[in-house]
Amino acid sequence: MRAHILTLLLVCPVSLAAAAATVTDRLLLQREAFIAARPAAEAGRWADVEPFLGILEDYPLVPDLRAAWLRKRLSETTDGETRAFLDRYPDLGFARGLRLAWARSLAERRQWERYLALYDDYYADKQDTELDCLALRARLNTGRSKNVADAALSIWLHPYSRPGECDPVFAYLLDGGWITDTRRRERIDLALQAGQIQLARYLARPLPPADLARINQWAKMRANPDRELQRSQAFAATAADRKLLDYGLRRLATLDPEAAQQRWREFADRESVGRGFSSDQRLALERRIALGLARNFLPGGREAIERQAERDGDPIVAQWRVRLALRDGDWPAVLKAIEALPGDADDDTSWQYWQARALEATNEAETAAAQFRSLSAVRDFYGFLAADRLDLPYTWSDQPIPADEALIEELATRPEFLRLRELFMTGLYSRGRAEWAAAVDGLPPASRPQAAVLAQRWGWYSSAISTAARSGQGNDLMLRYPLPWRDDFVRLSQIARIDPTLAYGVARSESLFMPDVASAAGAIGLMQLMPGTGKETAAAARIPWRGWHSLTDPQTNITLGTQYLAKMLARFGDNPVLATAAYNAGPNRVKRWLPRDGAMPADVWIDSIPFRETRRYVRRVLASDVVFDWRMNGEPRPLSARMPPVLADPD
């Protein structure tokens, strides 16, 4: 069908309007025309766009084509047209990209007055270093140098390299004598603390050789802190040596907490060095070492955390005091540690659950049962586990949003929602999400739940889920836990021999069912696979690999995601807890987190995972697994049945 439509569009451009009348779904024809015309617009070939304009005359996304063409053809000759276009469409998603590209184009062409006008209107408060430096250059080039030096110094005095657009401004500072040796050393200190050795060396070029020698000391400390710290007699009772010593100990606490503890003992009581640390510095350093020992489950870690907790009000230390007691099965200590948590911990269902578990283990069964019963009314990971402890049914509290058909229809016909629908239907998801958020924010609060229902009906699941949550409508479980691509999830999970509900739990937790989304780390698609993992999994499963296209195609992504999840299950003895953790943090880390001997209750293991992100991820996926099981099968298998004990690594 699509090939037929495109042939009709390209071969018979003169009679497009007539062609539209013969096509059953005119909107489908417009979508196909837009998709076909967009690459030409983005390439700056307007002549190749023109054949499609007849059918697209009233299509909501026509301005996007012009914006794409203008962005490609920015020049002196199009400045007037660009300004007029942005004045006409100031708030739409495509306008932001075009405006930013135009700003950069004006700066590249030294159109400083125009650049400043645009910058002052749109970018002055955005804290974009590149644009800020261009604005300072514009002010210098238009004779407005007042306060430029102060603003430029605040950008220059930074631990990391700055964009190349800042170089002319920094040259102005250098020529004017504002970059003094004192300021150089101040920035060098910042760079050294951040591990930016190359930047520090660059900054030290005009300084005496002693400055470079100091930087080389820091470089050695960064490369091998344990070796450098063993040279204890090389450190004198100076502020500079204490900074280097503190940096080395903090770095070693991350790389090898046991070695850091030993080295600190060697320095702590030395009159000439260790005692020069302030009490706050000592506390922070010892906290870092104690947490390093705790998170790596190293010998002496619990004792270090106990000592630290007695004199340190840090909430992370207090939480690890609970976790290590849990891991040791020391239930009286668990109760004591929970009682010492900061006051707001009382509202956290995790600590309520563990308090009940500890009460149960210390012969306070009646009190524990009352707390489990109260927790079981909550629909979350701990609420499900609490219900399992008492063999109670789960509390679903499913409350569908009542559909207001008149309001939904009124929203659907608004120009901004017509645009949103087409952005979604033509695959411009990222731009659509930004415009959706702005459109929903502009609605009265009472209308926002209906917008969530509208998004769900379109199949725009991520926007439906997020809008319902932001509207206080978190109990519509059909909307919050949809079943998109159900046939694919079921079929491909069966092929991989995993539960489709677990695959759904991973997909929802990873992407909220956004097929195009990419994480900051580079994972892509519904089940958020790294390209390397996707390629390796595709090869093992004999699936054609097309890079980014494979990961953004829903069916292929589900195929690869279910296969990789099956691989993690096989690697960790079919334990969904460990497989889910490995999916998020990697199998090598999970292997390091396993108990050294025997078996550990899965709930204890989950809550002692060193990474907060992974702890939350595993709980979220497993709780979602239960909800999807309920949605697909009516009566879900208990959460506790999905959580077998975690066994020690046999290797």
Image: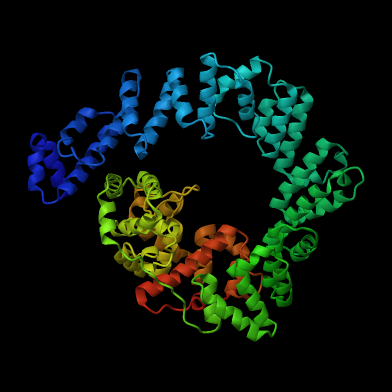
For the residue pair 99 and 522, the one nearer the viewer reads as 99
Residue 371 to residue 286: above or below: below
Q: Nearer the viewer, residue 271 or 259?
A: 271
- Foreground residue, 325 or 456? 456
What residue is at 64 percent from the left and 32 percent from the top? 158
**The quadrant where residue 229 appears:** top right
Q: Is residue 117 above or below residue 261?
A: above
Residue 21 quadrant: top left
Residue at image position (8%, 42%) is 19
Residue 547 in sight in this render: no
Q: Position of residue 6 (x, y in %)?
A: 16, 42
Residue at 92%, 45% (x, y): give it.
271
Residue 577 image position (x, y, % from top left) = 52, 69
Corner quadrant of residue 338: bottom right
Write the residue at 26% across / 61% down.
405
User: Is residue 321 something one can see in this rendering?
Assistant: yes
Q: Nearer the viewer, residue 216 or 345?
A: 345
Colouring of the image: rainbow
Q: Position of residue 150 (x, y in %)?
A: 64, 24
Q: Would residue 61 appear left or right of 584 to someone viewing this image?
A: left
- Image coords of residue 177 (percent x, y): 69, 16
In this picture, residue 537 sits left or right of residue 389: left
**How many numbered discs, if any?**
0
**Quarter placement of the C terminus:** bottom right
Q: Quick check: 345 left or right of 75?
A: right
Horizontal side of 145 relative to 436 (left or right) equals right
